[in-house]
Image (tube, helix red, strand yellow):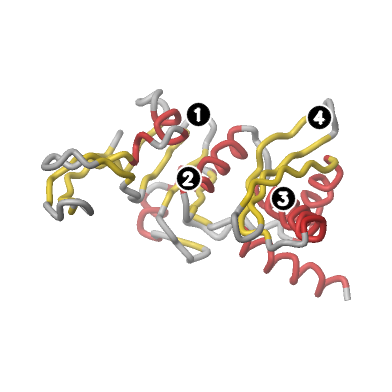
Amino acid sequence: MAEIVNKHVECPKCSQQSSTDILVSGNTVQDKRLREMIFSETVFRWKCKKCGFSSKYQHPLLYNDIERGFMVYYIPKVERLRVADDKLDAQYPELENVIKRIVPDVNAMKEKIIVLERGLNDFAIELTKLAVADVVAKETQHNVYAGYFTEMSEENNSITFQFFVGGERRSYIQTTRLEVYRRSLDIVRRYFPKADKAGGFLNVGSEWAKNALEEYKGAQR
C-alpha cells in the first residue's frame, strides 16, 4: 500500500511554509505510474502554495516491485553501506528473499531499478563499472565523478555505461564486451557468495565495489 505523509515545506523563494503530501512508499502493483513518476522525477516536484514557485523536493522514497521481488529505497546522500531493521526482518520473514537496496541519489535509483528489472547481478554490475571507469579515466585524462549502467546486448556482446567526467561533468558513453561483466559475476559468486545475505537494505555502489576489489586482490596474493 502507498504511504503518504503530510509535511510542511519552506519555500526557498518566499520563505513561507506550506503543507504538502509526500509519497514516501509505493509499489508497482497498486500504482502502475510509480515507475514513470520516478524516471520523469515528477514524484519529487513541489510547488509553493503561496507564491507558485516550483522546484524539486528530494525526500526518501521506497520503491517496491512486488512482481520482480526487489525493493529500492532512496535516502538522499545516504553513506551507510547497510540499513537494517532487525525487528521488521523478524516480523516479515518472507522479505528474506526479496532483494533490498538503498541508493543515495535519484540517478542511482533509476539505474538500480533498470538493473534489477533485467535480472542482472548488481554486485557484478558495480565491479564491471569500476573496471570500465578506470579505462574512461585513462582515455579522457579526467576524473570520473559518476557512472551508470544503460544497456546490455547479448546480440552485440556488449554492455554500456554512461559516465560523467571532468570539471564540467560532461557525459561520456563507454561500451565494453560482456566478458567483463561475466568475469565480474564469477568473482562475486566465488569470492562474495554471502554478499546479499547480510539482511536489511544494502548500498551496492562504488564504495562496495572498491572494497570488494581490494579484498579480491588480497585473496590473489
Amino acid type for the residue under numbered disc 2: Val
Tell me: residue 37, above or below residue 102. Answer: above
In the picture, the disc for residue 67 is 1
**Quadrant assignment for the C terminus:** bottom right
Q: Return the residue nearer the eye: 45 or 192.
A: 45
Mark 4 Cα shell of 10 Å, populated few (<14), some (14-19), many (≥20): few
In the picture, the disc for residue 176 is none
Q: Is 104 left, or right, of 151 in this rendering?
A: left
Disc 2 on helix, strand or loop? strand
Which image quadrant for residue 35? top left
Q: Using the numbered discs, state the Cα–Cα distance from disc 2 to disc 1 in whole angstroms.
A: 14 Å
Q: Using the numbered discs, state the Cα–Cα distance from disc 2 to disc 4 in whole angstroms.
A: 26 Å
Would you say the residues marked 3 and 1 are in contact, meaning their CB atoms lie under 8 Å apart? no
Would you say the residues marked 2 and 4 are in contact, meaning their CB atoms lie under 8 Å apart? no
Disc 3 on helix, strand or loop? helix
Q: Residue at x 17, y 45 (%)?
A: 6
Q: Which residue is mark 4?
A: 154
